[in-house]
Amino acid sequence: MPGLTVDDLQKVKEKHNREFSLKEGAYRARITVHMGTCGLASGAGKIMAAFKDEAANAGIKDIILTSSGCAGLCAREPMATVEAVHQPAVRYVDLNAQKIKEIFKEHVMGGTPLEKYAITIGSDEDAPFFRHQVLRVLRNKGLLDPERLDEYIARDGYQAAAKALTQMAPEEIVKVIKDSGLRGRGGAGFPTGLKWEFASKVASTVKYMLCNGDEGDPGAFMDRSVMEADPHAVIEGMIIGARAIGAHNGYIYVRAEYPLAVKRLQMAIEKCCELGLLGKNILGSGFDFDLEIYQGAGAFVCGEETALMRSIEGKRGMPRPRPPFPAVKGLWDKPSVLNNVETLAQVPLIISNGAEWYRSLGTEKSPGTKVFAITGAVNNVGLIEVPMGMPLRTIIYDIGGGMNKGRKFKAVQMGGPSGGCIPENLLDLPVTYEDIVKTGAIMGSGGMVVMDDNNCMVSTAKFFLEFTADESCGKCVPCRVGTRILLDMLTDITEGRGKEGDIETLEDLSRDIISSSLCGLGQTAPNPILTTIRYFRDEYKSHIEDKWCKSGICRNLCTFFIDEKTCTGCGACLRACPSKAVVGEKKKPHNITQDICIHCRACYEACKFNSIKISPAEAHEDEMAKVKSEK
């Protein structure tokens, strides 16, 4: 099949819009079931089947039934969007088979949207979760079928690549990206245009354009969602980058734990090869670029660029000292540029609209938008995109919907295991690279884990150290040995063996590891410790001096008991207790048998009357004596 030309792109767009537009006499409605990983895990496949069954039973054929990737609001999956002729689009959430029957009958067939199941009708302004967002990277979120190339082209896909390949010289492309101020969204925030410029100036007949889709941070799913929902945006960004630096070969490095992303990327690459958007003479421009997927085995260290390149080479994923930097000596010792998924998805928009347009959002040093995966103790868990400079408070309370179950905010972890915990008194901080770094955290790739007052910050630091110590490649001593020493100390503190001077030792050793580790993994691994000590030092002191974990997370440092004055005898704690430690009669105060209590917090979480109390283990007898005397 002959390859597409620039003129063909417009023809494909017009043909698609002509054949799939909602108009009387053609299609009465379009139903889009959002089928990213989050949607599929929540039952989106059954929702799609239910819509098909309803259409078949009604004998209706003038309906477009399609799918898309994640629509963003993962907490309300499964979701579907219904668009009918002459009516606003309606987003339905928390769907099940019974709701599908009603929606199909009343809305699809009857023309009356069901507000009781909808989160937005017509405008995303109806819901705070969507209202404060500005979609650039996620511009096609929930709007196109990622497995259909014509749908991407119909939304001006590959027009930026056509412009870059046929109207711009490589140095012009680099200049636009430099002028835009685009910074790498993988974590460090290095200027993208500067990286491209370095590689473009190296004389070599072989260069490589690489995409980092590894995304190993716990709680992060930004890149995965983009690859699943809009794979062509990433491919188009890579074509433009390859043209800018003079590369003719590229790899997308994706962890094998992302099977849906791998599947959709592979389908997109194959379709592009078939139609001449990859391979020889792309769009008749004379430029060649071949692209393939490399599946990683899930090693966190392979998120570091030199380790990732060694992994592609078939070697053990271990970083090497820099310089020389990959722009000079990278994959197979050839000049290479590595950008992450989100960075590359921004590139087509910048080429199409210009540097000034891109700078119209964000701040001077951190322009544009940033995609975050907001998770944890918030009501609206999901994928969001906001202008740089937006305060954390707006993200967590307006977009995130505030704290789940009415709990009190305690901290937000940014930057994953390489980041840090930001406390409540810094919630009005603008989200920019420079402001986040001042807190001791980092922007990272965009994971944002919100924690409430049930969290123990010492235990939180221990959790992330367990991850980084386990993921260390072992090449350099500071990271290999140092993180283990830190982890052992945190384990002692959380198990009641902490001693005077431990806090200072943790701080000193952390700084030594940061200054002497070979790569970013070791250089940032102590961040969770340093930030939790910085903002929650009293919790470390309580663990060490009082042998008490006030949140009840560290089992050796707490005792659970029931306040007889407020206990109603509802039985919720008794039913929740897995060890049968809670005893008592109905409508009478219950008690916890301490000898068999396993400190699992199940009773604490189940009680609606705040009758389950936490005290230091050795203080329990005094506490009970006080309660009895007050009676």
Image: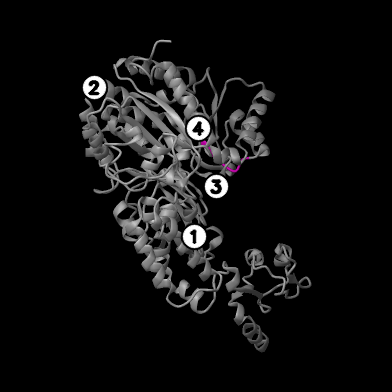
Does 126 appear above or below 249?
below
Q: Which residue is mark 4?
A: 262
Image x and y of residue 110, in percent: 61, 30
State which quadrant residue 185 falls in: top left
Disc 2 is placed on an element classified as: helix
- Name the element at disc 3: helix
Which callout, 2 or 1, points at the residue further toward the start of the chain?
2
Cα–Cα gap, marks 2 and 3: 44 Å
Q: Which residue corresponds to mark 2?
A: 167
Give the position of the N terminus as an image quadrant. Answer: top left
Q: Earlier in the sequence, mark 4 or mark 2?
A: 2
* Sequence order check, earlier mark of 1 and 4: 4
Measured in 3D between alpha carbons, the distance from the residue under mark 4 to the one under mark 3, in whole angstroms, is: 24 Å
Question: What type is the residue that disc 2 sits on?
Answer: Gln
- Give percent across and percent down for residue 499: 48, 76
Q: Report the span colored magenta.
A: 89-95
